[in-house]
Image (cartoon, rainbow, N blue to C red):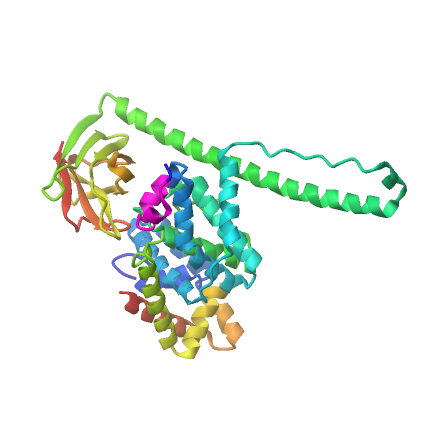
Amino acid sequence: MTNGHPIREDEFELFALGVIAGEECASIQAHIDACPECARKLAEARGRVALLSLAAPQQNPPAALKQRLLETIRAEKSLRAVPVRGTRPAPRWWNTIWAPAALALAIATVFLWISDRRLDRQLHQMRQATQTYQAQTQRDRELVQILTARDTMTVSLSPMPQVPKAWASLKYNPRMGLVCYTGDLPAPPPNKVYQMWIVPASGAAVSAGVFMPAAFNQGRVCVAKVPRNISCKAFAVTLEPAGGMPQPTGAKVLAGAL
Amino acid sequence: MNRAHGAEQNDSDWSLLARVVERDESALAALYDRYSGLVYAESLRILRDSGAAEEILQDLFHQVWRTAEKFDPARGSLPGWLLVAARNRSISRLRRRGYRDSEELNENSVVLPCGLETTVARNQLLGRVKAVLSGLADGQREAIELAYFEGMTHSEIAEHLGAPLGTIKTRIRSALETLKQALA
């Protein structure tokens, strides 16, 4: 145990490897679900353990597999319905021959089974797409609520000298959270991310989440929940290791007071 | 927006993912070229069945295409997620357990200790990991490979090898510590 956390440092790797079982495993999982700091340590342990996969003999997949993947996604993009092909009527003379008819039936059964699997997969994909749209709708709803609430405040974050062109506009609502729109932030160095901080009137800074600038500098909106009972004084963005840190450690790149 | 294939070799994972969100096939193809070998080799080693390994590889990249917008590069790396998801699915199939098909890109964040975006970086890391594993004692290497590639727990490894549970725990802990030190 370290600093009140029930997980020893070496247990993160063991948990990521999957060798811990039973109640011990459930207890670790329960703590990680509730502790961002341990979740970050587990993410790092997972990364180290995942590198054991490199011990496998290296072998490339067949070239045709890539083509099949691209054909699948092209078919989905075009939103064409898969035509349901009917079985061709058997020649009349087949009706008198039992064995070929049985063969035809077997082929049709296999064909229908394949079609059924394909339809199942399509249905599954459509369900996943629906879940995605629902999550996006919920996020957009929260965004609109924050932007239109009467008690929402606007804060402009100013750039530090190392990112002179960067900018950020932040809408802060103490009840609902904050929305930040950033622009012209350069891509962070490898294994680094930007992290948003809420600076309270007293006490240590509170993380409002990590984010990456969008490609092509067109800006990126990030929405974050704000802990209740916090009296906010200012906001800042720092450069931190991938996954974020519990407290700011890196260079400040944007800052603004409420 | 499609771009010449050569240009994509230098793009970062997150900029390629941003283009996948915009439904750019060439970006997905670039990510596939970059990581399919690692993912396929891992699944093949676990399953020893090229057909099953191909199916897992295709499913994973299909999922990247369908749900790329859910992936938050700030929480972890794409190759890390690919390797962990490929292992989970392969072991589930090997041991005939069901995996959560809802395993989303933004779940189970994985932070790799180093980048894998270039061929040089991948090859260097490959050499380091192989060197670490070949430097382990036979018992340690055997235990860690049973855990990683067969999905066995401490108790299962002890039973499989006919060794005391405490011995197996010590071997695995030591092997992981060696790996951690080597990658620090």
- The location of residue B148, given as percent across then percent down, is 45, 65
Taking the spot 35% from the left edge, 41% from the top edge, the residue there is B3
- The location of residue B108, given as percent across then percent down, is 39, 50
In this rendering, position of residue B86 left or right of residue A192:
right
Q: Nearer the viewer, residue A23 or A257?
A: A257
Q: Is residue A35 above or below residue B133?
A: above
Taking the spot 50% from the left edge, 54% from the top edge, the residue there is A63
The span shown in magenta is B3-19
Q: Quadrant of residue B133?
A: bottom left
Q: Quadrant of residue B178?
A: bottom left
Q: Is residue B46 above or below residue B70?
A: below
Report if residue A250 lies within the magenta region: no
In this rendering, position of residue A81 left or right of residue B70:
right
Report if residue B17 lies within the magenta region: yes
Residue most extreme to the right: A96
Q: Is residue A6 above or below residue A96?
A: below
Q: Which quarter of the figure is the N terminus of chain B placed in?
A: top left
- Residue A67 seen: yes
- Residue A7 seen: no
- The location of residue A236, given as percent across then percent down, is 16, 40
Q: Which quarter of the figure is the C terminus of chain B placed in?
A: bottom left
Q: Nearer the viewer, residue B69 or A140?
A: B69
- The location of residue A62, given as percent across then percent down, is 51, 56
Q: Nearer the viewer, residue A2 or B127?
A: B127
In this rendering, position of residue A229 left or right of residue A137:
left
